[in-house]
Image (tube, helix red, strand yellow):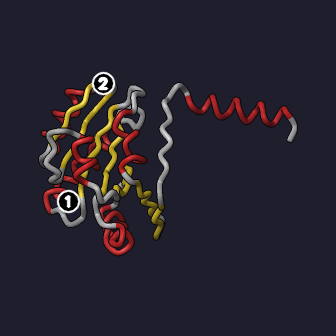
Amino acid sequence: MPKRLIYIGLIIFFAGCKGEQKVALEASEVFASKGVEIPMYDFESFKPLLNINDGKTRIINFWATWCKPCVAELPYFELINSRYPKDEVEVILVSLDLPKHVESKLIPFIQRQNIQSRVLLLDDPDANSWIPKVNSEWSGSIPATIIYKGGTSNFYERSFTYNELEKELKKIL
């Protein structure tokens, strides 16, 4: 390959980064069906998402399709996702559904609800080990949400209305 093409490729790559901190997560598997892709992570692979320091505010919501309060609040996370610029706020929906239900329940749910936020599956059976690493106060019940930016992080083990969620987001913005 000519050196000129390599240099052009490097210039395009670095120009595209624009100073953002890129966090590469290694999914153990990616479920794909009907245009929806759900990457699956164990906790160690997922953990870098809890500490990205690139100036963006992140809302990480732990939920499952079988959790009624989780499902009830998802439209509020979607509204936040649609109302705030992608370079300022990122909504990440962390499903705790079982991997065997991804294709039969999770993906159809995402399609029916037209979920546009980033969705991933956390599959780590050693919950007693990873739950306190997310937050030492977390009992493990869902819904649970982290809102963070840089070194400021707030954890909530509860469900939200839209106004409550936006109020907590604005405390971090």
Name the amino acid, label 1. Val
The residue positioned 30% from the left and 60% from the top of the image is 125
Residue at coordinates 41% horizontally, 58% vertically from top-left? 40
**In the image, residue 147 lies at what x, y percent?**
25, 36
Q: Is residue 169 above or below residue 78?
A: above
User: What is the CA distance from the residue labelled 2 to the residue labelled 1?
Assistant: 29 Å
Q: Find numbered disc 2 in the image and state the secondary structure of the residue it sits on.
A: loop
- Is the residue marked by circle 1 packed among few (<14), some (14-19), or many (20+) residues within 10 Å? some
The disc, 2 or 1, on the residue closer to the chain's N-terminal end is: 1
Quadrant of the image occupied by residue 137: top left
Q: Which mark is residue 162?
A: none
Work out whether residue 17 or residue 24 is closer to the camera in this orientation and state it.
24
- Mark 1, residue position: 71
Asked whether, in this view, residue 22 is left or right of residue 70, the answer is: right
Dot 1 falls on a residue whose secondary structure is: helix
**Are the residues at dot 2 and dot 1 in contact (C-beta closer than 8 Å)?**
no
Measuring 26% from the left and 49% from the top, which residue is drawn there? 129
The residue drawn where x is 34% and y is 59% is 123
Q: Is residue 89 left or right of residue 157?
A: right
Question: Which quarter of the figure has residue 51?
Answer: top left
Q: Label 2, on which residue?
A: 151
Q: Residues within 10 Å of mark 2 (few under 14, many from 20)?
A: few
Q: What quarter of the picture does the C terminus occupy?
A: top left
